[in-house]
Amino acid sequence: MNKKMVFGVLGVIVLIGASLFLIFKEDRQQYIFLIPEGYKGKVTVTFDQPDASPLVYEGKWIFFQVPSSGNITTSGSNVTGTIDYYYVDQAGNRTKIEDIPNAIQYLHTESGGSKNSANQTTEIPETLSFFVGTPQEYDNDRKS
């Protein structure tokens, strides 16, 4: 290979790399879950519910205040981004849960539809769910 071809290939690689960096560097939305200190159990967010409250934005952050039931409904749609979890004490102080090993289990989303025996489709709203607790607590909860 001659030098011009090598520099041409390297130039293309650099351009592709720079383009991918800029695409994925884009500021993405970030969910922040504020969970009552000591809460253990499933948290489920149900999206696109017309009569529910809208998402709460602060800049690129979307905040969810987790109630004691663990169930949240919103009129907003699910977005792609990162998730941070915080325990919140009575005074409003936050402790990032990633600093507590094995505190979040089984993060997943669901949506779609299902057909019944009469071949009618029932729409299932999009949900995002996770479990707050240890793997053992998660296993025990699933069995109950």
Image: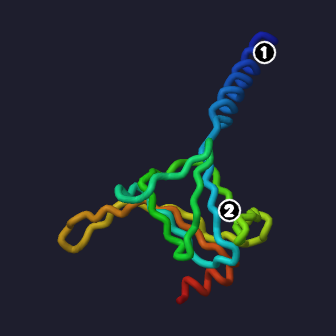
Q: CA distance from mark 1 to mark 2?
A: 46 Å
Displayed quadrant of residue 90: bottom right
Q: From the viewer's perspective, is residue 39 above or below residue 33?
A: below
Q: Residue at x 40, y 59 (%)?
A: 52
Instruction: Name the residue nearer the viewer: 124 or 41.
Output: 41
Residue 98 locus on image (x, y percent): 75, 63
Sequence-first tag of 1 and 2:
1
107 vs 78, left or right, is right
Q: From the viewer's perspective, is residue 57 above or below residue 72?
A: above
Mark 1 element type: helix
Residue type (three-letter) at the residue carrying disc 2:
Tyr
In the picture, the disc for residue 85 is: 2
Q: Residue at x 31, y 61 (%)?
A: 123
Q: Give the residue number, with chain letter if any, for mark 1.
A: 7
Residue 144 locus on image (x, y percent): 53, 89
Residue 97 locus on image (x, y percent): 73, 66
104 vs 98, left or right, is left
